[in-house]
Image: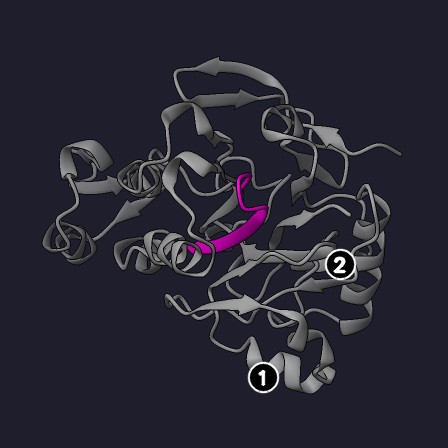
Amino acid sequence: MQPLNCVGLFIGLIMIPQTDFSLPLITYQDFWTAWGRRSYAFSTTRHGGCSVGNYATLNCTSYTGDNPAHVAQNLLTLGCHLPCSPCSFVIPTQTHGIDCRTIEDDFGQLSPSEQKKALQGVDALITALPEVCLCISTADCIPILLYDFHHHAIGVAHAGWRGTVSRIISHTLRQMQHTWGTSGSDVAAVIGPGISLEAFEIGMEVYEVFEQADFCMKQISRWHPDKQKYHIDLPEANRQQLLDFGIPNDHIYMSGICTHTQHRDFFSARRLGICSGRILSGIMLLP
């Protein structure tokens, strides 16, 4: 079975994706291959796995309470849908921080327990190793996938509202810059499925945190007088950080998928609670 390409109509920089998400994953290859065919990026849907209940069915994340045997089988299923089987899926235990880890050859020499310890509290990953699939787990938070096509390096970041306001994607790009000399013009980026402006209602305390962090609130927020609440646009807040690093507009792909609205196809913690499945968004360099 071939992976599903996410196709649809562009409106500005936002892609309005197709509504059939019945396969286990969506890919971004129609966008990605403009910068060569040496990397592969995807996000999983909820379909095609063996997990049950709030994890039904394709949950590939082990630390939110799912049956470990189901998670292992789901990862095998995911691997079958990729163009080549990765040497490893690197999946950190995220904590809404900004810690970014570089995956190098020595990571593969660690025992499974040592690898798990090394990935505890990590919310972003970068590597230049082929066939290592860097992954981020989300269920309303924003997954961001990066490809430096000049230096042939990749990165992923988990941007919930805390990570976004702490500018995790800027931090990740600076680490790529320090490691490989990455510049904005070298990078293609995908902002994957996550909660939308329309669905992300916040309290005044969260609005003030963004405001105090010098975000342009006119660009990333909207006041809803009926509920007397602000909404925040997390995808746009992260897109602005990509632009600030110098990544061109046409190098940025926005999936346009709201996990809260399309919760039957994508996991949403606001719908299901914390003890539920996660979307796995990943990228790897092909051999």
Q: Residue at x 67, y 34 (%)?
A: 27
Q: Nearer the viewer, mark 2 or mark 1?
A: 1
93 lies above or below 188: below
> Secondary structure of the magenta portion, mostly?
strand
Left or right: residue 212 compared with residue 285:
left
Report helix, strand or loop for mark 2.
loop
Q: Few, some or many C-alpha atoms within 10 Å of disc 2 (few <14, some 14-19, many ≥20)? A: some
The image's colouring method is one colour
85 lies above or below 98: above
Quadrant of the frame with the N terminus: top right
Q: Residue at x 56, y 75 (%)?
A: 119
- Give coordinates of residue 79: x percent, y percent: 82, 52
- Give coordinates of residue 81: x percent, y percent: 82, 43
Magenta highlight range: 148-160
Report helix, strand or loop for mark 1.
helix
Q: Who comes first in sequence, dot 2 or dot 1?
A: 2
Q: Is residue 149 magenta?
A: yes
User: Looking at this view, is 145 or 104 the one in front?
Assistant: 104
User: Looking at this view, is 198 or 95 the one in front?
Assistant: 95
Query: Does residue 199 appear in this view?
Result: no
Question: Which amino acid lies under the numbered mark 1 shown in the image of this protein?
Answer: Lys
User: Looking at this view, is 175 or 162 the one in front?
Assistant: 175
Most distant residue in the right direction: 1
Which image quadrant is residue 244 in?
Answer: top left
Q: Few, some or many C-alpha atoms within 10 Å of disc 1 (few <14, some 14-19, many ≥20)? A: few
- Give coordinates of residue 52: x percent, y percent: 75, 59
Q: Is residue 183 magenta?
A: no
Q: Which residue is mark 1?
A: 117
Left or right: residue 269 compared with residue 185:
right
Q: Which residue is mark 2?
A: 52
User: Looking at this view, is 253 or 151 the one in front?
Assistant: 151
